[in-house]
Image: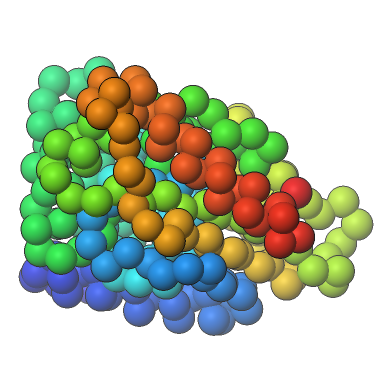
Amino acid sequence: MQRPKTREARADWLHRFAARTVKRLRIEISAVGEFPWRGAVIANHLGYMDIVAFAALHPCVFVAKAEMESWPVLGWMTTMVGTVYVARGHGGSAAKARYGMQSAMAEGLPVVFFPEGTTTDGSTLLKFHAGLLAQAMASGFPVTAAHVHYSLGAGNAKGASVENDVCYWGDAKLVPHIFRFLGLREVKVEVRFAEKSIQFSDAALHRKLAALEARAAVLELAEQGESAGVCG
């Protein structure tokens, strides 16, 4: 397949591809709140399905770790749409990320990234890394918090769980995990968006404090989900 020529066309292609994929897999995705139409979106990170879920909801651009480029299927998909890959510790990576994010946001596309820098089983929210967040803040565009939560229906095999069969984390092998995921039934995804962008304090100009405030904004959304009987 020929790669779409413009960033907007690539984001729209991924949106349509992801929406068709979740429909075929009978994955139910719902949004609480509005997907921001501009700026950066930050969220917790539970696995490869996070990218599919955000893309299915709205055309967007992703910033992801460099290892994803070599992943089967998802690596091809994200490369096709111009994902900004970040290799930690490599010279020029921060500048590349800043340029990629600013270019996408200037063209009116929201940019999604995951400040934890790795995935978890959802039982905790790790410390946020400040690097990409600082780049997003420096762009002058708003930064909006989001929270992803998965659940499974009753029609699954005994022992199936969100923690092990939906969340992709730790030392899990990718291909076996994908096959386990494809065998699940009644997968539901809720993506909860903050009503307003994060209002960083003046002190948050210090990047580490900004990371703390951003993490608190995502945690607040998780608590709202718990209060609504969704998370936990």
Residue 116, above or below 113: above
Tell me where residue 109 sits by quadrant: bottom left
In what quadrant of the picture does the N terminus appear? bottom left
Q: Residue drawn at (18%, 50%), measured in percent from left and top?
A: 141
Residue 174 visible: no
Q: Residue drawn at (20%, 69%), measured in percent from left and top?
A: 10
- Answer left or right for 67 relative to 169: left
Tell me where residue 132 sits by quadrant: top left
- Answer left or right for 127 relative to 151: left
Between 214 and 189, the one nearer to me in the picture: 214
Residue 115, above or below 206: below
Horizontal and vertical percent for residue 222? 61, 48
Q: Which residue lies furthest to the right in this view?
A: 158
- Count of labels in the image: 0
Q: Which residue lies furthest to the front in this view?
A: 202
- Answer left or right for 36 relative to 189: left
Horizontal and vertical percent for residue 58? 35, 71
Residue 214, above or below 25: above
Residue 40 visible: yes
Q: Which colour scheme is used?
A: rainbow
Q: Residue drawn at (60%, 64%), measured in percent from left and top?
A: 189
Horizontal and vertical percent for residue 2? 16, 72
Between 38 and 209, the one nearer to me in the picture: 209
Between 94 and 90, the one nearer to me in the picture: 94
- Answer left or right for 61 relative to 196: left
Q: Residue drawn at (69%, 37%), measured in percent from left and top?
A: 123
